[in-house]
């Protein structure tokens, strides 16, 4: 049995990483957020899987995020904004997954794609995201949510916990697929 779960959120600036964390913790949408949320620990008895869960925020403005943050993470949520095409493109590009894959390959960390700001669009981003899901076997699942209307927020963190505690299959880097 694992003693805890460490979730890291990464993604382009302004996609809503900090807001997602604050919405989860405060159970309401914060109108103003700092660049980066302090690391928070959710006690075991209020998590669905009964395991203490640490949530770590990241902002590119904080270069102090070191590789050790990645090494320590048990699951990485790559956040994009469903209304921001560029943030979706960055997910597909080398910038995030390619970079993370180095670390993922070394110690097999599941990834979760998180489409935030679903309150701002009518359509789903799934069509764009599906090919990426198929390309990278490290991606455990994807979820669309909204920090603003609290849609799928607790689900997102539950999926992250579950990806660590009950992984669905072997994880490997695409290079090794042959
Ligand atoms: P950096 O720390 O700069 O990387 O940004 P971030 O990813 O932490 O984003 P942040 O939480 O600071 O949110 C950026 C802006 O998006 C803020 O103005 C938020 O109020 C807004 N925002 C965040 N989540 C949502 C959402 O679900 N819906 C809407 N409509 N706006 C959101
Ligand atoms: Mg932030």
Image (cartoon, helix red, strand yellow):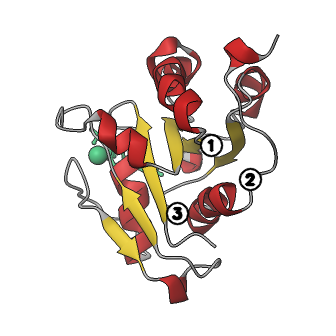
User: Which residue is identified by label 2?
Assistant: 167
Check the picture and name the quadrant holding the N terminus.
bottom right
In the rendering, at what x and y percent does residue 114 appear?
58, 43
In the rendering, at what x and y percent does residue 64 appear?
17, 37
Indicate whether 165 appears above or below 88. below
Please give left or right for residue 66 compared with residue 162 in the image.
left
Which element carries disc 3, helix, strand or loop?
loop
Confirm or deny contact between disc 2 and disc 1 (CB under 8 A).
Answer: yes
Check the picture and name the quadrant holding the C terminus.
top right
In which quadrant of the rendered view does residue 129 lie? top right
User: Which residue is identified by label 3?
Assistant: 149
Mark 3 within 8 Å of ligand 1, using the beta carbon: yes
Is tag 2's residue or tag 1's residue first in the polypeptide sequence?
1
Would residue 151 be seen by someone viewing this image from the given angle? no
Depth check: give the residue in front, 100 or 11: 100
Is tag 2's residue or tag 3's residue first in the polypeptide sequence?
3
In the rendering, at what x and y percent does residue 91 appear?
54, 24
Indicate whether 148 appears above or below 134. below
Residue in view at x 74 percent, y 53 percent: 167
User: Which residue is identified by label 1?
Assistant: 110
Residue in view at x 64 percent, y 79 percent: 48
Residue in view at x 31 percent, y 43 percent: 58
Which element carries disc 2, helix, strand or loop?
loop
């Amino acid at each position: 049995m694992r003693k805890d779960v460490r979730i890291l959120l990464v993604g382009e600036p302004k996609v809503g990483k900090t807001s997602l964390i604050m919405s989860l913790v405060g159970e309401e949408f914060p109108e103003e957020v700092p660049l980066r949320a302090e690391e928070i620990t959710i006690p075991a008895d209020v998590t669905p899987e009964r395991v203490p869960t640490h949530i770590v925020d990241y902002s590119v403005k904080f270069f102090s995020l070191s590789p050790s943050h990645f090494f320590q993470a048990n699951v990485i949520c790559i956040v994009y904004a469903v209304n921001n095409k560029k943030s979706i493109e960055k997910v597909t590009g080398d910038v995030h997954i390619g970079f993370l894959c180095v670390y993922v390959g070394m110690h097999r960390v599941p990834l979760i794609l998180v489409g935030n700001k679903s309150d701002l669009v009518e359509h789903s981003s799934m069509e764009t995201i599906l090919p990426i899901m198929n390309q990278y076997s490290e991606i455990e699942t994807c979820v669309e949510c909204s920090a603003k209307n609290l849609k799928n927020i607790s689900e997102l963190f539950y999926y992250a916990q579950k990806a660590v505690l009950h992984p669905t299959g072997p994880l490997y880097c695409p290079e090794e697929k042959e």
